[in-house]
Amino acid sequence: MSGHSKWATTKHKKAITDSRRAKAFAKLIKNIEVAAKMGGADLSGNPTLVDAIQKAKKTSVPNDNIDRAVKRGAGLSGESVNYTTIMYEGYAQNGVALLIECLTDNKNRAAADVRTLMSRNGGTMGDPGSVAYNFARKGIIVVPAANTTEDDILAAVLDAGAEEVVNEGETFEVITEPSDLVATRTALQEAGIDYDSADAAFVPNLKVEVDAETARKIFKLIDALEDSDDVQNIYSNYDLSPEVQAELQSEDD
């Protein structure tokens, strides 16, 4: 899930079935289509499209699929792309906040799906503004930790507008203002530092620490929401202590 990297490293690992892979590909393709529609197919003038393609390639989306998505989005194939972004707010277990971002061609279907999935998995819907105040929009660049250090990243990005670099274990997260996202990832490229993704996302101002039992319930809810074709991103403010992370990871070993 975007915006909560700990989810990726602590949730119960699942075999990537063809169905889940197809859903993941579809969401990445949507990002490409929307970026191409907003800024055109020319990569030199559309950094958002560059980042959408980069993320898709890192997730092994076939090049043919990517090329077709660019053409569809830019209107070069005669097909029409018309998605609407809708943000739903709600709560998972223990009062943990959820921002659920949908990218859909059917608002009624998206609304019904989100409400049903929330109610079936222990979540509750919130009114507009009920949790959004606790999140700030930021640029997040995810850098693999394997071939670089925090000092190397800091040296590359501080003058480009980066606010901080967070060590997440297997990755580093470079946090920026959304307006500094392109300059910062360009600085990484110029320094020869590879990155996995560069996205604008919602980052919580205050986090809620949860125990392992609550985390499992939250993960189940988020998993269910992510299985919806209309749900594009989920942002949350749960936090896991090192002890809880270790407990959850031990169950996967």
Image (tube, rainbow, N blue to C red):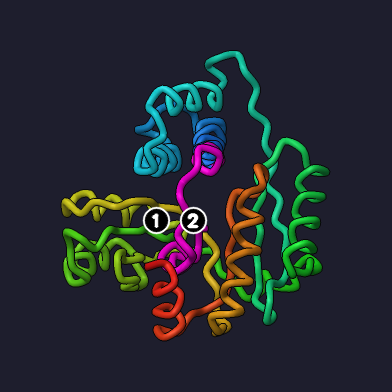
Query: Picture coordinates of residue 87 (x, y %)?
Result: 70, 56
Q: Residue furthest top?
A: 78
Please report the residue visible at 67 percent of the width from the left and 49 percent of the height from the top.
102
Disc 1 crowd, CA 10 A, few/some/many (<14, 14-19, 20+): many
The boundaries of the magenta stretch are 1-23
Instruction: Label 1: state its secondary structure.
Output: helix
Residue that appears at 61% across and 52% down: 226
- Residue 14 lies in the magenta-colored region: yes
Image quadrant in which the C terminus is located: bottom left
Horizontal arrangement in the rendering, residue 232 relative to residue 13 (left or right): right
Res 37 quadrant in image: top right
**Along the line of sight, which residue is nearer the eye, 197 or 177?**
197
Identify whether 15 is placed above or below 217: above
The reply to whether callout 1 and callout 2 are in contact (CB within 8 Å) is yes
Could you tell me how far apart the alpha carbons at marks 1 and 2 are, in whole angstroms?
8 Å
SS at circle 2: strand
Q: Is residue 35 visible?
A: no
Q: Nearer the viewer, residue 57 or 33?
A: 57
Q: Is residue 206 above or below residue 136?
A: below
- Is 176 magenta? The answer is no
Image disc number at residue 200:
2
Residue receiving disc 1: 181
Q: Earlier in the sequence, mark 1 or mark 2?
A: 1
2 is higher (above) or lower (below) than 166: above
Frontmost of labels 1 and 2 is 2
Q: Residues within 10 Å of mark 2 (few under 14, many from 20)?
A: some
Give the amino acid type for the residue marked by disc 1 in the picture.
Leu
